[in-house]
Each structure stands twice: as C-alpha cells, then as structure tokens.
Image (cartoon, rainbow, N blue to C red):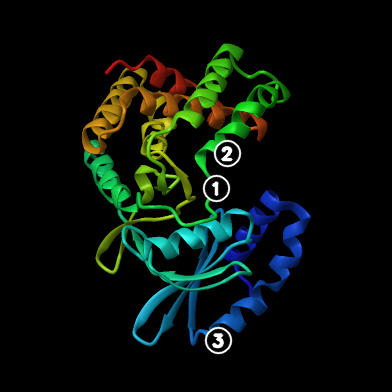
Amino acid sequence: MAGESFETFSAATRARFGDEARTWLTGVPDLTAELADRWSLQLGDAAATETAYLVNVARGDDRLVLELAYPDGWWPETTWALEAWRGDGTLGLFEHDDRGARLLERHEAIPVSDDEATTIRDVAAIARRLWIAPPEGITTVAVEVRSWASELRDRHVEAGRPFDREIVRRSVELFSTLGPTQGDRVLLHGDLHLTSLALADDRRVLIDPRPLVGEREFDAASLVRDTPNVLIADVHDGRRRVRERLQTLVDELGCNATRLQHWAFATAVDEAVWCAENGDHAGETEHIETARMILAAEL
C-alpha cells in the first residue's frame, strides 16, 4: 500500500500512539488484502482523515468504504455502538474485524447551512434517534468526567498555567457535580459537530461517533461550543450565536438549560487545556474564550 493518503494517515497514527502503532501500520497492507478477499471487495481509491484510512470499495452492487484505524480502546466500543444503532441515524455496519477494520456504508458530507440554527436542528433531530438503551461495555460519562475532574488542575499547571486558574477551578467543580447527578443515561454519539451531518444512501446520518453512556445534555453540549474560531472572530456575534445555540437545543431537545450550559462550559475548558498541552496556542485561546462566552450567556 502506497500513496500520500496512507503516509498522511501513518504519520498521524504514529503521532497519536507512538511506537506501539508501528507494527500495526506495517501490517495494514496485508490486512487490507486479506479482508478484500474474505469480504469479496473490489478496492478503489483511498483517502485519509486524522484517525482513519478510508478505502472506497465495491461488493456486488453495493458501494461501501473500508475503514482502517488503529484499534485503541475506543475502537471496540464504537463498533458495539454501531451494531446497536443498526444504521438508524448513523452509518450502517456491514462487517468488522477486531484488528481495526470496519466495512461501512459510503457517505458524502452535507455542507453546513448558512442558517446555523437549521443545521443544529437537523443534527439534534438525528441525535435523538441515537439516544437508545446502551449496549454493555460502553464507557460512561460519569467515569470519563471523574478522571477529568481529578486531573484538570494538574494538567493546567503542567501546561504552564496558560489562563486564569479560577476558570479551571470552576470547571473541575462542575465536572464533580454534573457527573454523579445525571438524568436518564442513554447511548450518546459523543462527538457531535455542525459538520457531523452526512448523506448515506439518501439518508441523513451522523458520522464519526465516539460513543459514551450518559445524559442527553452532555451530547448536545459539544454543539454549543463548536467552531470556536468562528465564535471568537466577532465577540458580539459569537455571544449571540452561543445564546441561540443554547436556546435552539433547549427548544428542540427539551434539555435542561443550566446543565447544558454547564457541560458546554466545562468541556470547553478541558479542550483549552488539551490544546495548551499540545502547543496549540491558537486553539487554546479559541476554546477558553468560547468557554467565557458560554458561562456569560443568559437565556
């Protein structure tokens, strides 16, 4: 297997997982050939994202995509979630191999509408279909945020205290409070964005889930803080957008407004710390300023 796309994917995978991914990457060409034979696939062109190598394939009259990704801890949980969703609101899963391969419906991106509220309503309508009783084995929001709460202060210090520690203290306090007090726990998409919408076999779906089990407000919160670069480009307009996003999600999903706002704020701070840890100072600024906008929003 050769080509710029695979080299890009290989570099990104090594950057994320280090030496442990090298052996796996070396075996990807043989894995692809083996699966093409076992699953009767005709291989086509390929592309790469930050997390996956995608090969367009055909099987009979079906046009599918072979997704290859390093099988980290999230990989099996995402597979279990896709099996539970059965293509209702997300991509259909046709085959999978525990070595890091899934055969999925092929899809195409849907451009984000100039009317942001319409896009949020569209994403919310499909997300609602994903919020089903969870299968066994999916990590819970409570477990995730417990570790965030315990580590965030130290991570902020180790990153050089890039912004006011009081905002970190408030985020830790919220994680510690929100995690144990959630409402009904359902299977969540886990990584909703305005760009999550795609078209698969003439169906609107949400792609690239990172499933968790928790309350709906946690899932919706990522839409409130999405596109931080856009939000901070014009502070007045950014504040308006944040208020409108919060209100739209409350209206469309019946979310608890306070919990939605608090989840959005706390997770934006966590993103800011992550950016600081990785030397992304522009991203750090975008996320922390977005967090301040969210905290100041009045509904």
Direction from residue 102 to residue 279 in the image, left or right: right
In the rendered image, residue 6, in percent from the top left (x then y), is placed at 61, 65
**Where residue 223 sits in the image (x, y, percent)?**
37, 37
What amino acid is labelled 2 in the image? Val
Mark 2 vs 3: CB contact within 8 A? no
Q: CA distance from mark 1 to mark 3?
A: 31 Å
Q: Identify the residue under disc 2.
A: 143
Q: Which residue is mark 1?
A: 139
- What is the spatial separation of the Cα atoms under label 2 and label 3, in whole angstroms? 38 Å
Mark 2 and mark 1 in contact? Answer it, CB < 8 Å: yes
User: Quick one: SS at disc 3?
Assistant: helix
Work out whether mark 2 precedes mark 3 in sequence or the reverse, and give the earlier one: 3
> Which residue of the protein is positioned furthest toward the right in this rendering?
19
User: Which mark sits nearer the N-terminus, 1 or 3?
Assistant: 3
**Residue visible at 76% across and 66% down?**
23
Residue neighbourhood size for the residue with mark 2, other residues' Cα within 10 Å, grouped as few (<14), some (14–19), many (≥20): some
Identify the residue under disc 3. 38
